[in-house]
Image: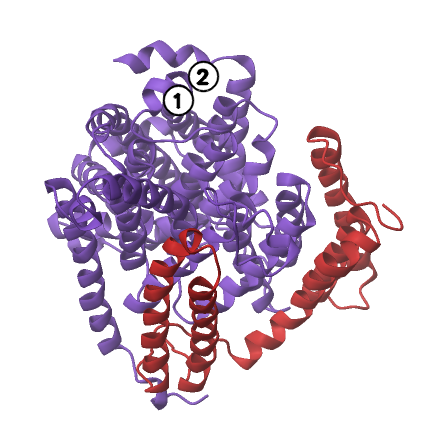
Amino acid sequence: MTTASRYQHLIPAIIVLGLAGIVAWFSFTEEPAEAFLFPRIISVFFLGLALWNFARAALGLARVGEGVSRETAMNIVPGLIIALAFVFIAAESLGFYVSATIAFFLIYTIYDPSRLADGRAWIRRIVTTLLFMAVMYGLFSMLLQVQTPRGMFF
Amino acid sequence: MEFLNYFGGVFEPISFLLLLGGTIGGLILGATPGLSPTMAVALLIPFTFQLQPTQGLILLGAAYTSTVAGGAVSAILLKIPGAPANIATALDGNEMAKQGHGTRALHLSFLSSGVGGVIGVFLLIFLTPMLAKWALAFGPSHLFWMAILGVTLIGSLDSKSFVKGLLSGCLGLWLSMIGYDDIQGAPRFIFHDALTGGVNIIAALIGLFAIPQVMEMFAKGRRDRAIEAVAVTKHALADSLSELGRNPRALTIGTIVGSIIGLIPGVGGQIAGLVAYDQTRKFSPHKAKFGTGHPEGVIAAEAANNAMVGPSLVPLLTLSIPGSPTAAVLLGGLLIHGIFPGSDLFERHPEVAWTFINSMLIGQILMVILGIYTARYVAKIAQVPVPIMAAAVLVLSVFGSYSVQQSMGDVYVMLVLGVGMFVLEKFGFSAAPLVLGLILGPIAEANFIQGSMIAAAQNGPMEFFFTGTLNIVLIAMTVGSVLYSFFSSKAIDAALPRAEEIKS
């Protein structure tokens, strides 16, 4: 089993500690106090455990978890950018179905091991994308009657 | 024998079609490496919105049952367990397939899954009403401690790190408090408009279970091609049946181990399969044959991982405490239909509860029949290339989370939680306690507030929450689970190298 480096463990430990600190701060400063009674109790445990986790990471005692290697991160970045752009930008501006079609096609193309010069691979990608989106349209628009944002296109 | 009165509901045309569809779909999803049963059930929830509660639960229950069994197909033919529950199956199943006994291994896996699964559902049928009657005596303080126990137990048992397991539970409890407070109507932790209505459980479940798997598929990059399945030849079903009959030891050990482990919240099918495999090997006169394509290994593992399905729902249906991440997702499916499981579920909604349980019984039988006759075709469908799978699950997650309330806010929450969970999982955090915290948080808070009000009118909170036999037992179990986790994570830590010894 591989584990992440001490530096890598520190980053999530700091983020979780920061989050626990924010939760504790809001729990003990916001009003009405009655509404924050339960959050206060939980935030004490949350902050205590986050401090413990941070101390373990800082001392190099945090060993569980393989972390994220440079290669893994580089592989993830293109897909993650597409997913974020699809959800936070394109879905409402271009329309749900058009942006989902583009996202599906881009992810398939980027992660497909076939050569980019392979003409048949391009046809396969286009056909698969259109078939999948037709199924999605049938399921969500026609069967479940979900009204999705239409944006500029559809 | 009340359950016998509700079998008719399972055979209503739409219900039976859903059971059939859920079973076939579950077999395909289960056989597809990278799609866990929990994720499959989470992605199916949006499709239950327009169904009646019973029909929705039949679909989810069928998918749960058959994804666990379907995972054996890829474990045997591809040597890739479809789900963690099928890890032990791959050890001997794939060896049998390589030796030309693939069909035999598939037959044995589905037959033993069916036997284990049916016995597990019978345990669910007979234990649930008994426990439910006992749970009727629970007051606010007991329900509060039960909810806390649920979070700490899953946090303790499901995570390799004591502190990270409990931290995951705390994160879930915090997420459950976002939105407007039920009693005062005060806004709490609403840092963005998308959080005004709180964190939607279904969107969160989809994000926490589906998005990390999409990211794992991204992480494989462009190198990963579909793996060729081992070719299978025909094998007489009657021979497989008689072989199963000749191995009662493996079947019995698998079923008993799976049933017991299923009743313990948080332990799960992976452990059930591996423990049953190990125990069967210990009691077998052919110890050396295990791992070389020995049928007992397949029988024990598959009987166990399906036997745990029924019992894992006992704490959910009686105490509202999901025994596994998939049970937590099923709880989400119940809640969106306005059904709150608990001690009085069988009094308020007997038709829903019993029809659901009966459908799981029929589903086990359907799973065996369909599994045996479709396994080799299912294996072919399951060889979907990873890039298509990643893109499809991402798009399904976005559409599924949007369709919950037709709100983009839910989609943002789904994606942010999913990406965050992927990173946290890489550092030893776990999704299961976080989900439990998210689901049990409102139960714990509501009973805490109610208990505090009662305590204020009596002798104070110390006496109300910390005295009485049941309170003390529940507190002792909570503390015990935390201590167990503390010492077991120390043992895991000792086996790992220090972080500073590893190059960044």
- Disc sitting over residue B157 in the figure: none
Q: How many marks?
A: 2
Residue B5's image quarter? top left
Q: Are marks 1 and 2 in contact (CB under 8 Å)?
A: yes
Pick the residue in front: B283 or A47.
Answer: A47
Residue found 50% across the figure and 69% down from its top = B423
Q: Colour of chain B?
A: purple
Residue under label 2: B10
Measured as percent of width and height from the top left, residue B363 is found at 42, 26
On the same chain: label 1 and label 2?
yes
Q: Tell me what hue chain A is rendered in.
A: red
Report x, y in % for residue B267: 28, 50
Residue type highlighted by circle 1: Ile
In the rendered image, which residue does mark 1 sit on? B362
> Looking at the picture, does residue B210 appear above or below residue A54?
above
Q: Pinpoint the chain carrying mark 1.
A: B
Q: Nearer the viewer, mark 1 or mark 2?
A: 2
Q: Position of residue B189 (x, y in %)?
A: 53, 59
- Locate residue A138 relative to residue B133 in the image: left or right: right
Dot 1 alpha-carbon crowd within 10 angstroms: few under 14, some 14 to 19, many 20 or more: some
